[in-house]
Image: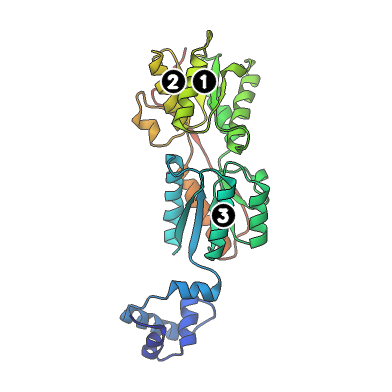
Amino acid sequence: MSTIKDVARLAGVSVSTVSRVLNNSKPVNSDVRDRVLIAIDELGYRPNSVARTLVNKKSQLIGVVIPDIDNPFFSALVRGVEEEAKKKGYSILLCNTGGDLEQEIQYLDILKEKYAAGVVFLTARVQDEHVSFFRESKTPVVFACQPENLTGGFSSVAIDDFRAAYEGTSYLIKREHKNIGFVSGPLSDSSSGVLRVEGFKQALIDNGIDFRSEWLYEGNYRYRSGYTGGLKILQQLERPTAIFCANDEMAVGLLSAARELDLSVPEKLSVLGFDDTVMAEIVNPKLTTIRQPICAIGKYSAHTLIGEIEGGVEKQHLLLEYEIVERGSCKSI
């Protein structure tokens, strides 16, 4: 295996000059740089990333912290982060926390020990412990899927969850649905969960429709909670004509509940999802849903983070576009 000394010898320069070319740390004459690059290519030299990390106290590693690796939403987002990171010469280290605060902090400590260059962070809600960690460690971070006002001044990439839920509810109301239920995400610690419920309620208020608390079920973004919530709402004496679910996985669970109760969708019940994951197209009927640009959220998160890591980019808060995708699970009354 070739060493940096071999490169220096072949190029006719010092080891420190080769190091400056590799790290782009100081200006090097273009002719000298070309000689070094040719020598690197001829020898097939690959820098020792571990040694470089120990010297520079920084790696080409980006940590990606997510709450649920089984959820197709997060896998799509991670794919976007990885694609953008690869283009810029970075690798990712995936940390699956199960949404547990203690596990999140443990993973952040591990990433700090590994000199991670930065972190794309997904959590149900940004806690004081998260903000304190990033302020004290000075590790660059981008909070994905978090509103600007909850990120402690750090960068974020998201959609407007309140407005998206408002427009989704309005979509159902325009189709003459007046009795509308909602299966939400966690409301105790989830910023997106709370914002989507608030958007739902505001759309009802603005259209003169009463909010029915018995038709609200607090789920956890998993299939089983959509199924359980569907049974609870749909087995009441008076049931809604449409149910809005705060993500596609719960909507698929609700479709199963409706099928079990012999309620055909969309003939007897309209179902609206949120996210537009792969699940939305593989169920029957195919799911009408609010499409988040999931992969793009990952790409913009990585792009923003690398801009901060390499300097010259200020902290920023990006709101990406969303849209309602019509398929077969909703109809007008």
| Label drawn at residue 146 | none
| Contact between labelled residues 3 and 2, with CB atoms less than 8 Å apart | no
- In front of the other: label 1 or label 3? 3
Circle number at residue 172: 1
Horizontal side of 165 relative to 260 (left or right) equals right
- Name which residue lies at 44% across and 86% down: 32
What residue does disc 2 label? 330
Quarter of image, res 267:
top left
- In space, the residues marked 1 and 2 are separated at their CA atoms by 8 Å
Residue shown at 47%/33% (left/top)?
Answer: 222
**Residue 210 point in image, percent of width and height:** 63, 15
Disc 3 secondary structure class: helix
Asked if 284 appears above or below 240 in the picture, the reply is below
The residue nearer to you, when weighing 269 against 136, is 136
Alpha-carbon distance for marks 2 and 3?
43 Å
Quarter of the image holding residue 182? top right
The residue under label 3 is 106
User: What amino acid type is highlighted by mark number 3?
Assistant: Gln
Looking at numbered disc 2 in the image, what kind of residue is underneath it? Cys
x and y, in percent, of residue 130 in the image: 63, 51
Residue type of the residue flagged with mark 1: Leu
Residue 254 spot, x, y in % from top left: 45, 23
Q: Which image quarter is the N terminus in?
A: bottom left
- Of mark 2 and mark 3, the one earlier in the sequence is 3
SS class, disc 1: helix
Which mark is first along the chain, 3 or 1? 3
Viewer-side residue, 48 vs 164: 48
Quadrant of the image occupied by residue 212: top right
Q: Is residue 45 something that shows in the picture?
A: yes
